[in-house]
Image (cartoon, coloured by chain):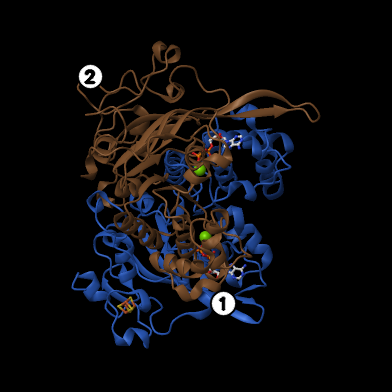
Chain colours: A brown, B blue
Amino acid sequence: MNAELGQADTGTDPVLEAKDLVKHFPIQRGIVVKRTVGHVQAVDGVDLKLHPGRTLGVVGESGCGKSTLAKLLVGLETPTSGSIKLEGREIGNLSARRMRPFRRDVQLVFQDPYTSLNPRLTVGDIVGEPFEIHPEAVPKRGRAGEVKELLDMVGLSPDHINRYPHQFSGGQRQRIGIARALALRPKVLVCDEPVSALDVSIQGQVINLLQRLQDELGLAYVFIAHDLSVVRHIADEVAVMYLGKVVERGTGPEIYDHPRHPYTQALLSAVPVPDPDLRGHREEIVLQGDVPSPIDPPSGCRFRTRCWKATDRCAEEVPSLAVGDRGTHPTACFYAEERDVTHAVK
Amino acid sequence: MSETVRVIGDTLPGADFNAPLLEVDDLRVEFRVRGQRIPAVRGASFTLEQGRTLAVVGESGSGKSVTSQAIMGILDTPPATITGGAVRLHGVDLLEQSEETRREVRGNHIAIVFQDALSALNPLWSVGFQIGELFRVHRGTSRKDAKLKAVELLDQVGIPDAKNRVGDYPHQFSGGMRQRVMIAMALALDPEVLIADEPTTALDVTVQAQIMRLLKRIQAERNMGLILITHDLGVVADVADEVAVMYAGEVVERAGIRDAFKRPAHPYTKALLRAIPRVDTVGQELEVIRGLPPNPAKLPGGCPFHPRCFAAEDKCATEVPPWIEPAEFHGSRCHFAEEVYTDER
Ligand SMILES: Nc1ncnc2c1ncn2[C@@H]1O[C@H](COP(=O)(O)OP(=O)(O)O)[C@@H](O)[C@H]1O
Ligand SMILES: Nc1ncnc2c1ncn2[C@@H]1O[C@H](COP(=O)(O)OP(=O)(O)O)[C@@H](O)[C@H]1O
Ligand code: SF4
Ligand SMILES: [Mg+2]
Ligand SMILES: [Mg+2]
């Protein structure tokens, strides 16, 4: 088994690759003269590899850096340090202008279909907006036709091209957001909680759409969510984040059936299973307290303040995302050990 | 606190202790907005007994919050009007009571916890003051004793170092801790019924687990009836005794927890359960409920679910289905409830 996330499969080269990606937001004080009094360590040394046609799931609780990671990958934020490669070419440190042609290839689908669409633009304008920024993509004459095709592709009626966002339901708006993200025929979609705001009955429709588009277009996805069962359903591989770092990564079965990091185990054990017969059978690890601040994260292992296995070593050394002795999947814990917390589910 | 003797006759004349704790009977609520009538709740019925947990599930807009606000008596009227039904506490219809009685019932008998604790708490007052205020206003407790009570409650709901945090303001607490403060306020006057309206929807799973554990513990200690409104079927399976499923303003199915999950008798419930991603759906297409939730101002005729229903036949579009009980304590508003229940449909 390989240490690198995304290498478990195929001989293909990764379409997107990040190495030691860091984003620290300065905290500034002062009105006239600003001085930096600290940093929010939102993303702190993340590696990932994404292969064409595959889905990498990213899970973790709010504030752990998922959205910041998404923005770094699509170029909405500039990394503090680290590298992002698109099809082998370094793009993390390019200026905005030189980066533009590459940006076409990696697009973002936002979480909130209610606030991410401009209410004053028609659906046609919203979906065609990327052509204004990248006029070279489709000649002006062809754009209306292209927009209609995109709407059709995401299961919306091309006749609705002149309607406004408020005339659509949440699930339909998310389809509009997906159509816009597809306009420039990207290779990668970064989906930041794309179904979190939707009802269960509508979630499934959007997930099925994303899977169909992946099959048809060979897209690669970074799929961010806090709903662990949705990620299990859609992802080939999963990265678990805690306070800006990836603490464990592996295939679906590795993460869900053989979790090795205490945080992953706690997270999985907290998810209630929709089967009343399993009530009381689930092993529940209840974490004490709240997640510490990313401004001044704990030394050593960032999870140690809430970890039942922590020792002095955990406060002194930073555990690396290492492969286990017997080739088990990468886990950033000195005492990584498999524990089947969802055993009753199978 | 568990030994408190309830002098219910005082605040609720006519209370009958052989009647169910809370009975919602064919409740109907309409909104009148710009000359339009929006029937938000069109027949909600369920019963809650002491010490039991009833989960109310359904997608957004199905009328769950409006139902709970009608029970609490905190609907804005206008635009809302209660157009029918009854909400009986120990047999007494609250909808018939004076505003003064209802005010007494709120907090003392029925209390509510909302999803969004931040907007439900006053940002300008310390949490201790807000909890203490309840004792001062309802019980005439002195300022000093009220503060002691507040500390005691904050401690009970698991706020660490409650003595020193009682003077803190809502924004100084994390989301999970704020929800604990909300729960403390709801418990202050020792209610018999607690309504929790999506209490963990805005929280992360590990925090959700803490809050659900707290609610269950407190319910058991006080033998309260709990109405848990949620759209998370995992939470329902984990804590509820009974389930009421709402669709388009109606309770379309009511059953004990096991029956609801294992032998649903309404196609909507069945479809909802099938739509959840599970271990065995990995790599498969998810089953979905086609179409969209209906617009309450323009409900389809017959069974409101028929345009999305896998089991529908012609009569579903024209005839309103009756309430059918394929088993004891298990009812469904579907023409084919029996067949859905036995899995023939
Ligand atoms: N522009 C910003 N300036 C300062 N801090 C930020 C900014 N964006 C995000 N953060 C902080 O970075 C951390 C990670 O945030 P985010 O990436 O949004 O997490 P998630 O999406 O996992 O909830 C949080 O503590 C957040 O407050
Ligand atoms: N203030 C209001 N004005 C008009 N209609 C309302 C108002 N509040 C709720 N409604 C209507 O009541 C329906 C049910 O709302 P609600 O009970 O909040 O749904 P749920 O809690 O199940 O998501 C909504 O679809 C909406 O049409
Ligand atoms: S009455 Fe008809 S449409 Fe309604 S749920 Fe039953 S089968 Fe479906
Ligand atoms: Mg986010
Ligand atoms: Mg609601």
Indicate which disc residue A325 carries.
Answer: 2
Q: Using the rendered image of the protein, determine whether residue B68 is visible from the camera's viewpoint.
A: no
Give the alpha-carbon distance from disc 1 to disc 2, as whole Å. 64 Å
As helix, strand or loop, the secondary structure at mark 1 comes to strand
Q: Which of B150 and A346 is in front in this view?
A: A346
Q: In the rendered image, which quarter is residue B343 located in? A: bottom left
Q: Which amino acid does label 2 sit on?
A: Asp
| Labels 1 and 2 within one chain | no
List the residue tagged with mark 1: B38
Q: What is the x, y in percent for residue B332?
A: 33, 73
Q: Mark 1 or mark 2, which is nearer to you? A: 2
- Chain designation of label 2: A
Q: What is the x, y in percent for residue B300?
A: 44, 81
Distance from mark 1 CB to nearest ligand 2 atom below 8 Å? yes
Q: Is residue B164 above or below residue A68?
A: above
Residue count near mark 2 (Cα–Cα under 10 Å), binned few <14, some 14–19, many ≥20:
few
Residue count near mark 1 (Cα–Cα under 10 Å), binned few <14, some 14–19, many ≥20:
some
- The residue at 26%/78% (across/down) is B336
Q: What is the x, y in percent for residue A280?
A: 29, 42
Image quarter in which the C terminus of chain B is found: bottom left
As helix, strand or loop, the secondary structure at mark 2 comes to loop
Distance from mark 2 CB to nearest ligand 1 atom below 8 Å? no
Q: Is residue A6 above or below residue B79?
A: above
Q: Which amino acid does label 1 sit on?
A: Ile
Q: Using the rendered image of the protein, determine whether residue A70 is visible from the camera's viewpoint.
A: yes
Indicate which disc residue B268 carries.
Answer: none
- The residue at 35%/27% (across/down) is A262
Q: Which of A344 and B70 is in front in this view?
A: A344
Q: What is the x, y in percent for residue B229?
A: 46, 57
Q: In which quarter of the image is ligand 3?
A: bottom left
- The residue at 58%/42% (across/down) is A97
Q: Is residue B71 above or below residue A306?
A: below
